[in-house]
Image: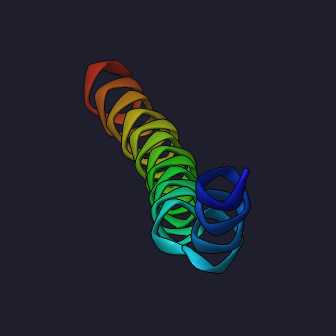
Amino acid sequence: MKSIASFLRAFNSDDSGAAFIEYTALLGVILAVGLVVLTGIGVWANSRWVALSTSLSTP
């Protein structure tokens, strides 16, 4: 019984798993923001390219 209690106390004080979860969540947020930014830049560049192509092809 004493070994189970000491195991539970050690498990309760161990927070390395919590730090891993926090860093994983932070990485997910950074990746999501990066994806949104890159998508926005792609949409902007595409619209500029279409506008340039249209203006050059118009007689």
In this view of the protein, which residue sits in the foreground, 30 or 19?
19
Q: Position of residue 20 (x, y in %)?
A: 45, 61
In this view of the protein, which residue sits in the foreground, 56 or 39?
39
Instruction: Tell whether 45 sits left or right of 26.
Output: left
The image's colour scheme reads: rainbow
Which residue is depicted at the point 58% across and 56% down? 3
Image quarter of the C terminus: top left
* Figure check: 20 above or below 45: below
Toward the bottom, the furthest residue is 13
Q: Position of residue 46 (x, y in %)?
A: 40, 33
Which residue is depicted at the point 40% across and 25% down? 54
Which residue is depicted at the point 55% across and 74% down? 14
Q: Position of residue 2 (x, y in %)?
A: 68, 61
Instruction: Tell whether 45 sits left or right of 22.
Output: left
Toward the front, the furthest residue is 1
In this view of the protein, which residue sits in the foreground, 44 or 17?
17
* Figure check: 27 above or below 43: below
Instruction: Tell whether 7 sits left or right of 59.
Output: right
Instruction: Tell whether 46 sits left or right of 57.
Output: right
Which residue is depicted at the point 53% across and 50% down? 28
Q: How many marks?
A: 0
* Figure check: 45 above or below 33: above
Q: Position of residue 21 (x, y in %)?
A: 56, 57
In this view of the protein, which residue sits in the foreground, 44 or 53?
44
Q: Quadrant of residue 18?
A: bottom right
